[in-house]
Amino acid sequence: MSDSEVRTTTKKDLVNRIADRTGQTKAVVRDVVQHFLDEIVVELSKGQRIEFREFGVFEVKERAARQAQNPRTLERVEVPGKRVVKFKVGRTMRARVCDGPAPLPAEPVRTAAPQPPPQPPQPPPRRPGSPF
């Protein structure tokens, strides 16, 4: 799938698929999914680590304060420390998403024939009897 074909899957899409597979109503599935997501947020806000075996691990990390530079003005700026959520991919997800075969490109990529490396410029030949 190329970048132009990437589609966003929404919570509603997931709820519809789960409801179809389980025979539950969309309202029940929507509530369960929302409660599940709410609990993840609650646990992370407490600083807890959340582990789903084979899927991955969510955890909160402290990012230290640092000095940065505004690229337009070159002014030094103090960036305060903050808490960020990190996700580490689990074994099953890595195998199916990251390590699986890469999707084939829509059209074959054509490359030009390799060019020889450029040669450094050579000084002009010296004339006999000339200091240059």
Image (cartoon, rainbow, N blue to C red):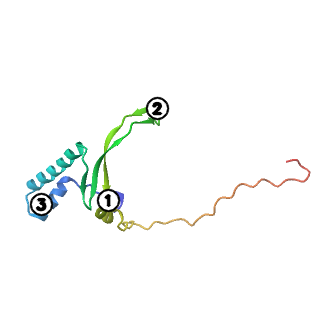
Q: In 3D space, how far apart are the residues under numbered discs 3 and 1 (Cα atoms)?
A: 26 Å
Which tag is nearer the camera, tag 1 or tag 2? 2
In what element is the residue under mark 3? Answer: helix
Q: Amino acid at mark 1?
A: Glu
Q: Which residue is mark 3?
A: 19
Q: Residues within 10 Å of mark 3 (few under 14, many from 20)?
A: some
Disc ID at residue 129: none
Near-viewer residue (103 or 79): 79
Among numbered discs 1 and 2, the one appearing first in the sequence:
1
Instruction: Give the mark nearest the N terminus, 3 or 1.
Output: 1
Residue name at image x 21 percent, y 46 percent:
43
Corner quadrant of residue 47: top left
Which residue is disc 2 drawn over? Answer: 76
Mark 2 belongs to which amino acid? Arg
* Mark pair 1, 2: CA separation: 40 Å
Q: Which residue is mark 1?
A: 5
Q: Position of residue 14 (x, y in %)?
A: 18, 57
- Describe the element under mark 2 as helix, strand or loop: strand
Q: Horizontal and vertical percent for residue 29?
A: 11, 56
**Residue 34: where, in percent of width, then height?**
15, 50
When asked about the image quadrant of residue 70, the answer is top left
Q: Is residue 20 left or right of residue 126?
A: left
Tell me the amino acid under the disc marked 3.
Ala
Q: Tell me the element at label 1.
A: helix
